[in-house]
């Protein structure tokens, strides 16, 4: 069974895209066939791999009325295990395009169905909102990962995300699970980071991944070179931490499968 993981937090600048890119690369590095889907109109996950001239069709074409098959837009990367479903600024129009369409929240799930079996992991990068694109991601997913920046007021707003999550679990996607919360942009030298780490641990407890992603300039630089941290700076803290996070993610996904089998058997 393919693990489909939404990376979401309606705040911008908390490390969603950086996590989507480098977690996908680190999962692929462990030999899993991985598809990174960019649902953010800003398309930062896409630009981290391709020049804009290299993108013809995007997730917009898949989700809008043209219903371009997903298989037609998936692009290979330099890593043979890593593929990208590109995003584009046009995605910003989707809210209007889909308004009033009864199947609006299910477009992505339907589009993914024919390609899901081709991948072990699918990672969805989402925009900083809880609009139709993030809802499509959550309806399609098996798991949710929430990056939280180690900064004051970091937890504010996660209520809204968790409420959306519960609503999606209640009806369209009861199988959805929170895989974990990951602290990003952590700076161990600052009191802010230490304080917020404690606060986040109190609120989220066991859900928090053991791995924290430190603030590291190499993570900021790598997209400009069209590389993930694994090839751009393989020994940097960012590469080491995203590899550790990938190991934790894979372990939790496998544990959740065992738990699900046990539930099914009971
Ligand atoms: N661990 C990190 N260390 C340093 N810079 C980071 C780190 N994570 C993200 N950034 C930078 O912070 C900015 C916001 O990160 P991004 O992943 O785009 O967040 P989001 O997708 O949530 O808006 C980007 O410029 C990114 O390069
Ligand atoms: Mg982003």
Image (cartoon, rainbow, N blue to C red):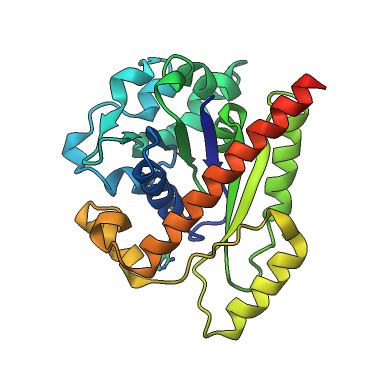
Work out whether residue 46 or residue 12 is closer to the camera in this orientation and state it: 46
228 w.r.t. 70: above or below: below
The quadrant of the picture occupied by the C terminus is top right
Q: Residue at x 57, y 45 (%)?
A: 251
Q: Residue at x 49, y 16 (%)?
A: 113
Please indicate whether residue 221 sits to the left or right of residue 143 in the image: left
Q: Quadrant of ligand 1?
A: bottom left
The quadrant of the picture occupied by the N terminus is top right
The picture places residue 100, in percent across and down from the top left corner, at 60, 20
91 w.r.t. 182: above or below: above
Q: Residue at x 44, y 72 (%)?
A: 215
The picture places residue 176, in percent across and down from the top left corner, at 67, 33
Q: Residue furthest right?
A: 266
Please indicate whether residue 98 sits to the left or right of residue 261 in the image: left
Please indicate whether residue 115 sits to the left or right of residue 150 in the image: left
The picture places residue 214, in percent across and down from the top left corner, at 47, 70
Work out whether residue 42 or residue 199 is closer to the camera in this orientation and state it: 199
Q: Is residue 192 visible?
A: yes
Work out whether residue 148 or residue 25 is closer to the camera in this orientation and state it: 25
Work out whether residue 233 or residue 101 is closer to the camera in this orientation and state it: 233
Total number of numbered discs in the rendering = 0
Q: Is residue 10 visible?
A: no
Q: Residue at x 57, y 20 (%)?
A: 106
Q: Would you identify the image quadrant in which residue 144 lies? A: top right
145 w.r.t. 85: above or below: below
Please indicate whether residue 167 sits to the left or right of residue 125 in the image: right
């Amino acid at each position: 069974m393919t693990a489909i993981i939404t990376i979401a937090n309606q705040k911008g600048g908390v490390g969603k895209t950086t996590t989507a890119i480098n977690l996908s690369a680190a999962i692929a590095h462990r030999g899993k066939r991985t598809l990174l889907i960019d649902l953010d109109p800003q398309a930062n996950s896409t630009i981290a791999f391709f020049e804009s001239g290299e993108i013809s069709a995007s997730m917009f074409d898949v989700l809008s009325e043209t219903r371009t098959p997903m298989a037609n837009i998936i692009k290979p990367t330099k890593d043979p295990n890593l593929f990208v479903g590109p995003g584009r600024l046009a995605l910003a129009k989707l809210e209007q395009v889909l308004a009033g369409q009864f199947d609006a929240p299910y477009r992505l799930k339907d589009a993914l169905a024919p390609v899901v079996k081709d991948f072990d992991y699918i990672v969805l990068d989402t925009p900083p909102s809880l609009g139709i694109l993030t809802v499509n991601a959550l309806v399609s997913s098996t798991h949710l990962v929430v990056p939280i920046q180690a900064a004051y007021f970091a937890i504010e707003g996660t209520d809204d995300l968790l409420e959306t999550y519960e609503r999606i679990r209640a009806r369209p996607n009861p199988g959805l699970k929170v895989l974990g919360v990951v602290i990003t942009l952590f700076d161990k030298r600052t009191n802010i980071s230490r304080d917020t780490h404690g606060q986040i641990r109190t609120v989220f407890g066991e859900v928090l991944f053991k791995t924290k992603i430190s603030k590291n300039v190499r993570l900021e630089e790598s997209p400009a070179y069209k590389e993930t941290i694994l090839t751009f700076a393989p020994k940097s803290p960012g590469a080491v931490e995203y590899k550790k996070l990938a190991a934790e993610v894979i372990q939790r996904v496998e544990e959740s499968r065992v738990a699900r089998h046990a539930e099914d058997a009971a």
